[in-house]
Amino acid sequence: MKAYIIYHQDEAEKNAAFIDMFKKAGIKYNIFFEYISYDTYKNHPLPDFVINRTRDYKVSRWYEDRAVKVFHSSLITRIGNDKYKTISYLKRNLPGKILKTKWCPESRLFTSNELNAFYKEKKLIRDRYIIKSLNGHGGEEVFMVSDIKSQDKALNNLKEKDCIIQEVIDSDSNDIRVYVVGGKIYAAILRHGNNDFRSNFSLGGHVEEYIPDEYQKKYIQNFIDAFGDKELGMVGIDFILDRDNNLVFNELEEMAGSRMLYKCTDKDIVSDYVSWINSFCCTRL
């Protein structure tokens, strides 16, 4: 089989080793992976399947319109790169028993125009809250606001972006990244922020393997099923771990990285992902 891995050029350069891992893993299954630039993907012959690592759902849709399987679909790529769309989608698709719990922080969409208005008025939106851009990644566009000064800093950085504001969940800066491969829980990593409310590994957070208990596994599976287990090739689902050890949904990381997993475990997620893709595609053929 011929497969494309599509990246923006600058992202491809940063992830050259990751791309190479796919190429090496594909040898065992006679899958030839080729990197294709986002700027040129329409100019190449159609492959057997595509791994879209651009965060642009239009890339996935372009291949879907030509009956080429894409990981991930335009639906998952779209909602997985818009934090408010993710929550709105889950509200429509999670079981009622989950929706009756504290399954996610109280959230509100704020357009860039609304944020600019508050910035000019010097009016605190609420006593204490988290604000983040809808499509930010790695914690770079996430801010904790507790007063006018911190709000000004946040809004000054985000004033041209549509954002989501959320209540603060007391968690001691702990969250869980659940890796999903082929619609099943693959592994989980506990992240803890170091002198920062954000726990992202890229920002210096401490990471270690986390083993969910049976109750947590069933709880997490509700989210996997809501997204569509057949739609999730390799993603991360992030949960805040509150002080009572409850999991509170944070976001879907459609283009999940794997550095944490290789650091904390002996699992080879790329190899296992390629193995699942091979089985999936052979079943379809």
Image (cartoon, grey):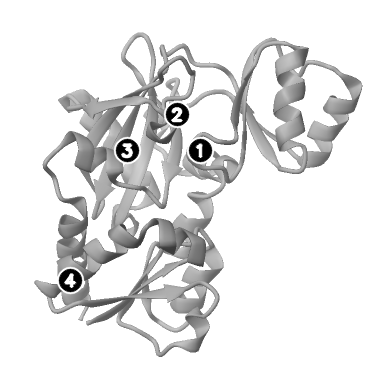
Measured Cα–Cα span from mark 1 to mark 4? 37 Å
Within-10-Å neighbours for mark 2: few <14, some 14–19, many 20+: some
Position of 117 relative to 229 (above/below) = above
Residue 99 numbered tag: 2
Closer to the chain start, of discs 3 and 1, is 1
| Position of residue 30 measured from the top left corner of the image (x, y, whole percent) | 14, 79
- Horizontal side of 203 relative to 258 (left or right) equals right
| Position of residue 112 measured from the top left corner of the image (x, y, whole percent) | 78, 40
Where does label 3 land, which residue?
222
Q: Which amino acid does label 2 sit on?
A: Leu
Instruction: Give the number of the mark in front: 2 or 4.
Output: 4
Closer to the chain start, of discs 1 and 2, is 1
| Position of residue 70 measured from the top left corner of the image (x, y, whole percent) | 38, 70
Where does label 1 land, which residue?
91
Instruction: Give the number of the mark in front: 4 or 3.
Output: 4
- Horizontal side of 48 relative to 120 (left or right) equals left
Where does label 4 land, which residue?
26
Measured Cα–Cα span from mark 2 to mark 3? 11 Å
Measured Cα–Cα span from mark 3 to mark 1? 12 Å
